[in-house]
Amino acid sequence: MILRKSISFLLLLLVVTSAVKAQDLPIIKEIHLSPDLDRSGKAVGLHVNYSVQYNTDKSHDLTLLFNSLQPYLDRTTDVVTRLSVIDTQGAVSYRAYPDTNINDLSLQVWKGNRPVKGKNIKIDYHIPVAVSIPKRRGPHIDLQATGGGLAGAFTSFLLYPEMLNSVDLSLKWHLPKGFMAVTSKGENDCQIKADLSELMFCQFIVGKMFAYPEGRRGKGFSLYALGRKSDEMNQAAVWVEKVYAHLRNRLNGKAENPFRIFIRSYEGGPLASGVAVMGGYTLYLPPSEDATSADIHSLIAHETVHAFVGSLHAQEGEDDWYSEGIADYLCMVLPLEAGLYTPAEFGKLINEEAALYYTNAIREVSEKDIPSVKWSGRNAWSIGYSRGAMYFANLEAQLKRINSQVTVVALINQITQQAQAGEYVTKDTWEKILATSVGQWAVEDWKAMLSGKLIVPEPDIYEGYTVKKITTGVFDLGFAKPMKVQKGEIVKGLDPNSEAAKAGLQEGDEILASININKTYTSYSNTLSIPVLRKGKKYTITFQPRKGSFEAYEFVKKE
């Protein structure tokens, strides 16, 4: 989501700069990158240097921009340091001004104490790594130390000229012995020809890494990992390559196109997550997670779908029913049809999706209101994911029941094809496709979903399963802070009538361990155990974080 918003802004820059004469635009021919290592050999930052080149010797107002990653991430340590700007007259003093918000993208603006002069302006600076557990955890595009190396995206480190609109540059890595570097564009030194938006969201990983397969990896599937054991990665890579191949075929990908997966692992919180670009993705795996488990398999499949299926153009959150919903739905059903899940694994996944939806406190909010409430609660962010997955599952069941030749995958591929042809795809595009390919009944069902109407599963929503109506409470931790169960945080705003308080949690308790609460709100039955410290004594508080009683559904395998 943040990627699309940033791209929208960068496209706006292209429009603005199109009015500027070509000879006045800055270009960058090479970017030189080298990891900063401390005395123990640990990566602590990234050294960046490049030259901004002009066609004339006249003076230029060179403004530099740096993505502050707000509101999704907090930059604290990972800021521009030791910046040097040199022109034909010597050093130019630059300082940062308050962030400028354009199209919901927060940009730090750097300006010099005078215009720069000359055809070749040298830029040199360092970016320290981000804190491993930020106050807010958005997409994994920040600069992180991982497995002795570094991983992130260009937007995590690149301070770039304001009027830069596209690049055709050489990427030059200066690496310690044993290190290799891989970006979305290739291994080690490579050429990057792209518009600015594509450059900024180019992902990378650098260090002494696991790489699969051995040998030449220029085309097709490849996987790289920092901070994971080789035996685990060799085993995991076999499944990952199989699911990539099946999803690529079903979603009209091309086998000859590079598809690069980057895995970074460090003590950065308990929740595994990823961020995809077209043609690959970065995955964060906590050290405690097993890369070969069914839960991680579904996350891998989810991100693989993203790498082939784009988003609709919409306000942040309003298209989650499509981009995240289809990824959640297809990451369950497509690996199953390829025999990559066991029946038990599939049953667990579809019931987790149901619990994610029906235990959500904002489960009946309309899509137009999601942007204002998406981050209002612990699992509020997930409403588009689970609602969309339930919608697509119901749509597929209805299509099968009427013996339609149309499938959900065919509809999605049609959207992707239009987007790849340069069309501006929105929810109106989806409505038109439904009306022409399926019928008006499908349009009405879709509009009901957008309005927030609670989705009732079709009786035959998943083959081999029956639908059982149950009651459940919405997910509620019972305290206002912290929003996550995070080690070192102090419990505040405890509701005395909550299940947590009834189980013995008290205001002021210190949380002793970070816990992945996703595993609780993706289950109708799981309890949550929080270890706390109170007046020098340790306690473990176990409770089911639920509130109220509401209609819900689960899926039971037929005998």
Image (cartoon, rainbow, N blue to C red):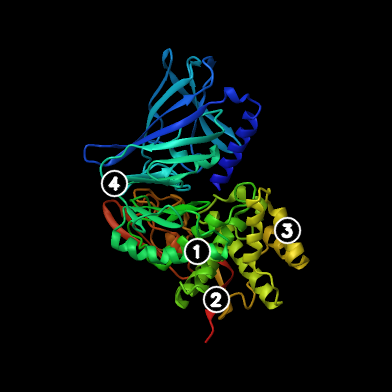
- Disc with the residue nearer the chain's start (1 vs 2): 1
Q: Which mark is residue 546?
A: 1
Q: Is mark 4 on a helix, strand or loop?
A: loop
Q: Name the residue under label 2.
A: 555
**Front-lying residue, 497 or 453:** 453
Q: Where 501 falls versus 15 (above or below)?
A: below
**Crowdedness near tag 2: few (<14), some (14–19) or many (≥20) residues, C-alpha within 10 Å:** many
Q: Where is residue 365 in the image (x, y as percent from the top left)?
A: 64, 56
Q: Nearer the viewer, mark 1 or mark 2?
A: 2
Q: What's the amino acid at mark 4?
A: Gly
Q: What's the amino acid at mark 1?
A: Arg
Report the Cα–Cα distance between label 3 and label 1: 36 Å
Q: Mark 4 points at which residue?
A: 148
Report the Cα–Cα distance between label 4 and label 1: 41 Å
Report the Cα–Cα distance between label 1 and label 2: 20 Å
Q: Where is residue 340 in the image (x, y as percent from the top left)?
A: 46, 72
- Disc with the residue nearer the chain's start (3 vs 1): 3
Q: What's the amino acid at mark 3?
A: Glu
